Every structure is written in C-alpha cells, then in structure tokens.
Amino acid sequence: MAPASTTQEVTPVNVHLVTKVINVNSCEDGVNTYTCNCLTGFEGRNCGVNIDDCASRPCKNGATCNDQINDFNCTCLPGWTGPTCEVNINECFPNPCLNGAMCSDFVNYYNCSCVAGYTGKNCETDINDCANNPCHNNGTCQDKVNGYECICPTGQWMGKTCSEIYNACYFTPCQNGATCATNPPSLDYNCTCPLGFDGNTCQNNINDCIGVTCTPPLVCHDGINNYTCACETGANCELMTSYCDSAEEVKVDPPACKNGGTCTGGANAFTCSCAPGFTGITGANCEINIDECEPGPCQHGGQCQDLINGYECNCTDTGFNGTNCELNIDDCAPRPCQHGSNCTDLIKVMIVRLTLMIVSMINVNMDLPVWMVSLSTNVTVLLDTAALIVKSKLMNV
Ligand SMILES: [Ca+2]
Ligand SMILES: [Ca+2]
Ligand SMILES: [Ca+2]
Ligand SMILES: [Ca+2]
C-alpha cells in the first residue's frame, strides 16, 4: 500500500490530471515540488521508466530475456525448457531408438547406439548380411540379424559358406559309438555297430536275455552284449527271498513268527510255518498253543494236561493206565494169591468200592454174606494194596 499522504489525499484521477503520467500510485505535494510513489515495476521522477527486469540476466543457456512490468520471460534456445530455460529437454523420452538400441540424450538431439546387425538414425534397419554374397557353390544366402545362413546344394556342399565337400558322417548319424563310413560327396553312410547293438544307426541295444533262464528268484538283466542274473529288486533280493530278514514288520522283537515258527518271504509279504503244537498263521503268527486235550483223549476219567504238541493223561485212581488210561491195571501182577490159588484181577475201582462196603458193614455189626467172606480171604491181601486208597477215600468222605 502507498504511504498515507502527510498533507493531502490525492485520488488517482487527480493525479492523472496533475502529473499527466501513469504508473503512479500516489503523489505527495511538497513546497514547490512533489514526490511520486510509483506502481511496482516503474521508477523515475514521474514513474515513466519500466524497470529492466532482465538486468540480472535471469535466462539461462543462451535464452533471450523479455522484460515485462515487474516481470520477465525467457525465449529458450532449442533443446531447453523451464521458466529460465534451465531444463535440458530429454529427447530420449519416449525412447525413439528401435531393436534394443540404447539412447543417449544431448542438447536438442539424441543418439541411438544400435545392437549388432542394425543401422539407421533409430536403428530401424536390419543390415543385409548377404550383401557381399558370402555363399559359394550356388548356396542360397538367408539374411539373419548380424549374420547369414547359406543353404547349400543337398548332398554336395556343406559348411558356413558351402565351401566344403559334403560329408554325411560329419553329422555323426551313427549312435552308441558306432563307426561311420561314407564316400563324399554323398548322403549315404554306413554304420558299423559295436557288439551288442543293431539297427541302421546302431540305435538298438540287443536284448541279450532272450533265451536266458536265471535261477529264481534271480531275473535276467540285459546289458551291452551281456546279461546278468540278479535280484529283481534290492541288492540282496530283500523284498523277495530274504524278506523275513529285512522287512520291518518281520524284524520286530519278538520275531514275527513266534514260538519257533519259520518265516517264509514272498513279494512284500511273509508267511509263518509254525512249530509243532502251535498255530495262528494269519495275524497271530504261531502265538496259539494248540489244546491237545480237545476233544478229550483221556479215557476212564483220567485228567488231561495240555502240553506243547502233546498231552498227558493222569490216570491216578482210575484203575487204568496207558497213554490214554485205556489199559486195565493188572492187580494180580504182584502175585498176591498164595499156595497156588488163582488170582482174578478186578478193576481197582470195584475193589475200592467193595472195601468201603465191607468196612461200613463191619462198622454197623452186619453179618457179611458168605460170598463176601470167601472173598475176604483174598481181600486181606487186597486190602493191603488198597489200604492207602481206602484211607484217602475215607478222609475225603
Ligand atoms: Ca520491466
Ligand atoms: Ca536434450
Ligand atoms: Ca541382417
Ligand atoms: Ca543288450
């Protein structure tokens, strides 16, 4: 804002009338003089001078400065921009270079560094590498990027420029180390196969197992001009014959086949051959002790005791003996009858019962029947032999 007049306020209209000049903000009257307060950008006694805003040379990089009222603008040289032309325009954006070329920005121009095989301002041209006719012997040239390819007359010439005589063996058509023979220039060749291979290019490994029989579980493995009889799987056929020694489910402690059972390996499985007296082939694996007391082999009330792979009959007090208590004990064996009398063997049980009857009759003072008295002549001896049995029976009664 203009400073306030110390003597008199003057309106702009009045100022124009008095001073006949513009660019004045206010005028201060003095004693035979006046003072002008100029608008911004002007100077001089009557504010008639446009201040040179270009005096400080604000425009850069050779630009032309244009003075304005309290301002300036710059007219840039080509390649520059910005208020004072301080910015170098990037002519590489967007990238004008083609085919993978690298762009370098300069002032008002750019340069493309082409990859090999291209040329032109923007590397837009694929150089014709066939221009110098590099292919000989009627080879056809095909232009490539930074190179060429010669298509040579078939079976006659070969090489980069078709300058070498065609050699079919050069391309190693014979396989597996076979020897190649040809008569250049020719497409024909002959392979001499090493032992164990056949086919036009010796590509086949002859199956040497044909007609071979290996001892099971070994199987034939084809080699090169030989064969081997070896396990189907595993170095020691462990998944076959030695399965019982290797498989985890067999190696557990106690062993899979219990109670002395024999393990037999199969394909990823095993079976148990149980020892005599045991069973349980599936799952139980010979864990079951067979009960030989079924179905009751002991006769005449003998007590059966189950053993491993057998039984034992306890024939005590049955009057029989033998494996199954089937034999009547010969009570005459000790020759109890004296003076040439005949001995008649009775079943011990009957003796015991008869003895018990006699004893009980004596106890109640009953008269013994005549047959029992005559019998008792020998009963004296019989009682001796049965005394212990009678005693134990009486004890139990
Ligand atoms: Ca100016
Ligand atoms: Ca530039
Ligand atoms: Ca080319
Ligand atoms: Ca073979």
Image: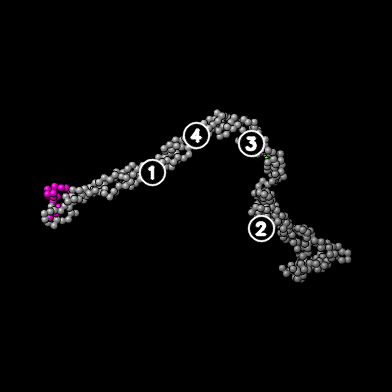
Q: Magenta segment, which residues? A: 11-30
**Residue at image mark 1:** 106
Foreground residue, 7 or 222? 7
Q: Secondary structure at mark 1?
A: strand
Q: Is residue 40 above or below residue 321?
A: above
Label 2 vs label 1: CA separation? 90 Å
Q: Which numbered disc, 4 or 1, marks the residue that appears first in the sequence?
A: 1
**Residue at image mark 2:** 254
Label 4 vs label 2: CA separation? 83 Å
Q: Is residue 24 part of the magenta span, yes or no?
A: yes
Q: Amino acid at mark 2?
A: Pro
Label 4 vs label 1: CA separation? 31 Å
Crowding at label 3, few (<14), some or many (≥20) Cα neighbours within 10 Å?
A: many
Q: Which numbered disc, 4 or 3, marks the residue that appears first in the sequence?
A: 4
Q: Secondary structure at mark 3?
A: loop
Cβ of mark 1 under 8 Å from ligand 2: the answer is yes
